[in-house]
Image (tube, rainbow, N blue to C red):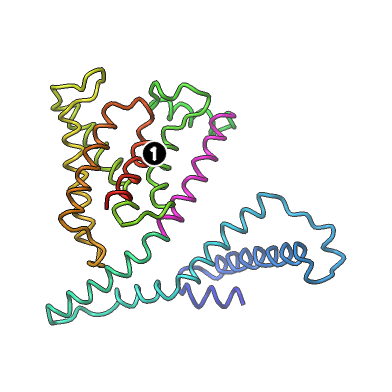
Amino acid sequence: TSLYSTALLLKKNFTFGELAVVAQAITLLAVELWVITVKKFRLVKIPSLNHHFPSDITIFQIALILGMFLIGIILSPLLVHSRNLAQRPAWKSKRKRVFQNNGRKWTSFALLPEFMHLAFSVALSAFIFLEYLRYFAVYPLGKNIHIFLSEFLDNRDSGPCILSHLYLLVGCAACIWMQGTSILANISGILTLGLGDAMASIIGKRYGRRRWPGTSKTIEGSIAFIIFHLLGAFAVTRLWPRNNLLPGIEEWLYYTLAVSITAFLEAVSYQNDNLMIPLFMWTLTCLLI
């Protein structure tokens, strides 16, 4: 069944030998899952299973890999719909082309929380694993990872663990994981760190002249934070297909206020802004719009 299904779904992707290996791997994982499930819930009495004790890493591997397939099965209606839309020939009527593009756009955005949620979860797991390798100096990667990450340390990474890159990932991911009240709340981390904070650093270092009292941050950098954050938010709302959920003029004024307060906090805070600023922005966005 595994061999036939893989060959049917992924035509021309494998040679026969590669196909046999992939099908065998899927079969082994599926059988191991069945064995663990039967033993856990005592569905069938099989004496030989009493001596089978899978390791924790095996259970994790099964959950991760087969979980990916399960997610694909659950999302299959949307995935098939998205592929069908993408394969339709371009329609001659301009009005029809606009409708078709809106359909593709809606499907893409409908899938976006699910996929980003999953991607951030897997990435965080990978980062934590790499921190294990670095902290415990696991040969041969631990030393090289430590040397690479040491290039990006600042005074806030004074403990035994290097957390800035983890905070950057969590800052972007947490706003999606917590499922805010709007699309702008959910992407607060991406807009705040990917646009606002990044452009504040670039503009502040290149053009900054006036500094906030007691800090090295510049007022010009904070203005850049506000402008580019709002530009990114406006672009996202223009692409968002569900117009009934878009902010009105009053909500935009509140949102601008939230961005401005967040920019000020970014300038004067001594906390790790990769973690704190996105969460602060997410909270204000949920409260104000």
The percent coordinates of residue 12 (x first, y second) are 45, 72
Residue lying furthest bottom in this view? 92
Q: Which residue: 52% across, 40% down?
A: 128
Camera-side residue: 170 or 53? Answer: 170
Magenta stretch, main secondary structure, is helix
Residue 117, by quadrant, is bottom left
Camera-side residue: 286 or 76? Answer: 286
Relative to 193, say whether 213 is above or below: above
Q: Is residue 24 magenta?
A: no
Residue 215, by quadrant, is top left
The percent coordinates of residue 236 (x first, y second) are 23, 56
Quadrant placement of the N terminus: bottom right
Residue 50, by quadrant, is bottom right
Left or right for 172, reference 289 = right
The answer, for residue 209, to whether it is visible in the render is yes
Q: Secondary structure at mark 1?
A: helix
Q: Which residue is mark 1?
A: 168
How many numbered circles does the render carry? Answer: 1
The part of the chain drawn in magenta is 115-136
Relative to 40, say whether 155 is above or below: above
Q: Which residue: 60% across, 68% down?
A: 23
Which amino acid is tagged 1?
Leu
The answer, for residue 189, to whether it is visible in the render is no
Mark 1: few/some/many CA within 10 Å (<14, 14-19, 20+): many
The percent coordinates of residue 93 (x first, y second) are 13, 82
